[in-house]
Image: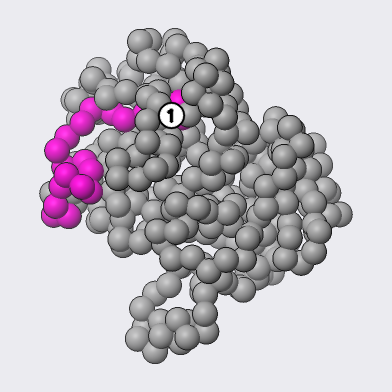
């Protein structure tokens, strides 16, 4: 796979046997992964991404319903912090989210889903506080005093997770003690220490009951690991089943945080086991909608 990393760094990692991103050992090449990423984006935002455009080998764009073009890969060299601050679509999808429950704190630079493409989020959920607020809906289940964005089925997905978890909470104190009281959903603010909007600003994230061990800035790694071990697997799986990523799977852990990010979850679900002998789209359930997107991508790329 052609990666945005110098030959020197590649050699360094090989010589010292330090694992790079797990995908470096996979068989998929750059072109294949670009097709997979774009297909995942189209499946994740079907009412908002309408087409693909290739201007050259170095310029591929997704086309939004508004007509806005968003480049897939800007070809710039970036360290981890820059990818968090100003990711392109390729950066956003670069790290594979693990669907299995972890009990260890992840590597410090492993944060799948923590890189957010703000142009994409603004196109889908609203490009200002006022526009976002117009897209909010009060939850009808679980936390009726909270609001969540109704675009792209975000609020429906949260309610589906809660409908699975609330009955369990009645008999499982480990789940109930985390679900109640939740810390909040929509809150238009920047992430502490940065100039970046929090995903809570878009109404696509929920923080459950807070514990002093939940957040990497508050907690030691040892205490964070204890909290991970205590976190119910069924709770995490219910959110992931409904396309939420869990901040407990980030090196910069945020254990109370769940964020609606269908593109991260669908890529993990459909392409985690892909190999070079498969069709590039192998793993995605085929239907009329998916076949349409595959045809668009094959024709344009």
Numbered disc total: 1
Outermost residue to the front: 195
Magenta stretch prevailing secondary structure: loop
What residue do we see at 21% from left, 31% from top?
A: 210
**Which stretch is magenta?**
203-222
Q: Residues within 10 Å of mark 1 (few under 14, many from 20)?
A: many
Query: Does residue 291 appear anywhere in the picture?
Result: no
Please say if 28 is above or below 258: below
Q: Residue beneath label 1, please?
A: 201
Residue 214 position, x and y percent, is: 21, 41
Residue 159 position, x and y percent, is: 45, 20
Residue 163 position, x and y percent, is: 41, 19
What residue do we see at 67% from left, 53% from top?
A: 71
Please say if 223 is above or below 127: below
Viewer-proximal residue among 129 and 283 = 129
Helix, strand or loop at label 1? It is helix
271 lies left or right of 137: right
291 lies left or right of 188: right
Quarter of the C terminus within the rendering:
bottom right
Query: Does residue 189 appear anywhere in the picture?
Result: yes
Colouring scheme, one of rainbow, by chain, secondary structure, one colour: one colour
260 lies left or right of 174: right
Quarter of the N terminus within the rendering:
bottom right
Q: Is residue 182 magenta?
A: no
What residue do we see at 55% from left, 15% from top?
A: 134
Q: Is residue 220 magenta?
A: yes
What residue do we see at 39% from left, 54% from top?
A: 111
Residue 217 position, x and y percent, is: 20, 47
């Amino acid at each position: 796979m052609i990666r945005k990393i110098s030959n020197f760094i590649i050699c360094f990692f090989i010589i010292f046997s330090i694992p790079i991103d797990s995908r470096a050992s996979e068989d998929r090449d750059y072109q294949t992964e670009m097709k997979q990423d774009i297909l995942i984006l189209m499946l994740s935002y079907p009412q908002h991404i309408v087409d693909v455009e290739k201007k050259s080998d170095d310029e591929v764009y997704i086309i939004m319903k508004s007509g806005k073009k968003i480049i897939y890969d800007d070809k710039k060299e970036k360290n981890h912090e820059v990818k968090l601050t100003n990711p392109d679509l390729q950066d956003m999808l670069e790290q594979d989210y693990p669907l299995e429950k972890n009990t260890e704190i992840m590597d410090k630079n492993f944060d799948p889903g923590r890189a957010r493409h703000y142009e994409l989020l603004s196109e889908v959920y609203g490009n200002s506080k006022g526009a976002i607020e117009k897209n909010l809906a009060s939850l009808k289940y679980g936390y009726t005093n909270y609001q969540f964005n109704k675009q792209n089925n975000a609020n429906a997905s949260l309610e589906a997770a809660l409908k699975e978890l609330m009955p369990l909470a009645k008999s499982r104190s480990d789940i109930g003690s985390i679900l109640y009281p939740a810390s909040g959903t929509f809150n238009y603010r920047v992430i502490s220490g940065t100039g970046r909007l929090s995903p809570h600003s878009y109404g696509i994230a929920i923080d459950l009951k807070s514990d002093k061990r939940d957040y990497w800035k508050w907690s030691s790694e040892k205490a964070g690991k204890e909290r991970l071990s205590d976190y119910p697997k069924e709770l995490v799986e219910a959110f992931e089943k409904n396309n939420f990523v869990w901040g407990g799977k980030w090196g910069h852990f945020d254990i109370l945080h769940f964020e609606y990010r269908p593109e991260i979850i669908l890529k993990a679900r459909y392409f985690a086991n892909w190999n070079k002998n498969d069709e590039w789209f192998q793993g995605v359930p085929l239907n009329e909608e998916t076949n349409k997107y595959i045809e668009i991508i094959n024709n344009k790329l």
